[in-house]
Image (tube, rainbow, N blue to C red):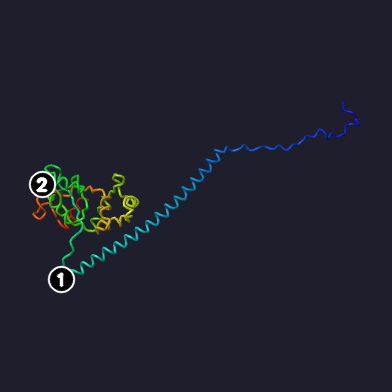
């Protein structure tokens, strides 16, 4: 029992004691800090590379559009000059003789049966290893002599700018690391022949059609075109006959454009 005179006493010593407890944060290992720093650096580099790639793609698109416009104006000017020369010659009672073509398109129309070793070797040099393969060739004295030797097995002519453009856009494949890569983007062309200044389809078509200073590099970059059998087919009776005699083989001049249109 409590004593009466101690009933209202307060025992301050019984009040709870509060103490400030300090909690220490766990220390991060040095290896984790290094890994975080490396990941941050890699992420920053990737972000910068992505930004630079977008800027380059945007600039390349502008350059390609500008090049295409420039070449289009050049083709129109050349065509207008040819028409003007023909009219001027006709007005003076003469004839306009255009310059000799510098580019030929060769299409193989016969297989390997009965082909002489010399003709087979020439077709290998022209990269015509399969039937209906087509390649561009720069015309000079030696290539014209070689074409005459393989006339029974191929047909060739002088392609127009439109034909070259359709072949590159519709059947164009590039050669990268000895592999056949479709030309689906200008980056394929830039990787293959960008070192010689050919960076887009417009540059490639212009280099081929005008037989420019880097024609060899551009033509070697292009894989031989694989065309289909022409709509309507070849006649078995006239396939071995020269084009001038009503057949299919040999030089057909500008008529090659109609044949390519049937084979694309």
What's the mark number on residue 3? Answer: none
Q: Residues within 10 Å of mark 1 (few under 14, many from 20)?
A: few
Q: Which residue is mark 2?
A: 236
21 left or right of 53?
Answer: right
Instruction: Compare residues 18 and 49 and report the one nearer the observer.
Output: 49
Q: Earlier in the sequence, mark 1 or mark 2?
A: 1
Secondary structure, mark 2, is loop
Classify residue 68 by image quadrant: bottom left
| Residue 236 screen position, x and y as percent | 10, 47
Secondary structure, mark 1, is helix
**Is there any visible trace of residue 97 in the rendered image?**
yes
Q: Residue at x 34, y 61 (%)?
A: 66
**From what the image shows, is residue 209 above or below residue 8?**
below
Q: Which residue is mark 1?
A: 90
| Residue 38 screen position, x and y as percent | 51, 43
Residues at marks 1 and 2, CA–CA distance in whole angstroms: 42 Å
45 left or right of 140?
Answer: right
**Is there any visible trace of residue 168 in the rendered image?**
no
Q: Residue at x 29, y 55 (%)?
A: 204
Most distant residue in the bottom direction: 92
Nearer mark to the viewer, of 1 and 2: 1
Most distant residue in the right direction: 5
Q: Residue at x 20, y 67 (%)?
A: 83
């Amino acid at each position: 029992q409590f004593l009466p005179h101690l009933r209202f006493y307060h025992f301050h010593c019984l009040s709870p004691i509060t103490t400030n407890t300090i909690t220490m944060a766990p220390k991060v290992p040095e290896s984790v800090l290094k890994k975080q720093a490396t990941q941050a650096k890699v992420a920053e580099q990737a972000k910068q590379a992505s930004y630079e790639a977008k800027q380059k793609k945007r600039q390349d698109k502008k350059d390609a559009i500008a090049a295409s416009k420039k070449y289009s104006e050049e083709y129109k000017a050349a065509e207008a000059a040819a028409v003007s020369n023909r009219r001027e010659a006709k007005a003076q009672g003469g004839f306009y003789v255009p310059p000799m073509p510098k580019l030929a398109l060769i299409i193989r129309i016969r297989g390997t049966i009965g082909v002489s070793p010399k003709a087979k070797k020439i077709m290998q040099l022209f990269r015509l290893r399969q039937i209906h393969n087509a390649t561009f060739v720069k015309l000079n004295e030696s290539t014209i002599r070689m074409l005459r030797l393989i006339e029974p097995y191929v047909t060739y002519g002088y392609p127009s700018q439109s034909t070259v453009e359709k072949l590159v856009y519709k059947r164009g494949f590039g050669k990268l690391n000895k592999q056949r890569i479709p030309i689906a983007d200008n980056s394929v062309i830039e990787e293959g022949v960008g070192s010689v200044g050919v960076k887009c389809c417009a540059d490639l078509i212009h280099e081929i059609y005008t037989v420019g200073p880097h024609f060899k590099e551009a033509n070697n970059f292009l894989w031989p075109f694989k065309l289909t059998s022409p709509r309507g087919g070849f006649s078995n009776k006239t396939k071995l006959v020269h084009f001038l005699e009503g057949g299919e083989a040999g030089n057909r001049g500008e008529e090659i454009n109609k044949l390519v249109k049937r084979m694309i």
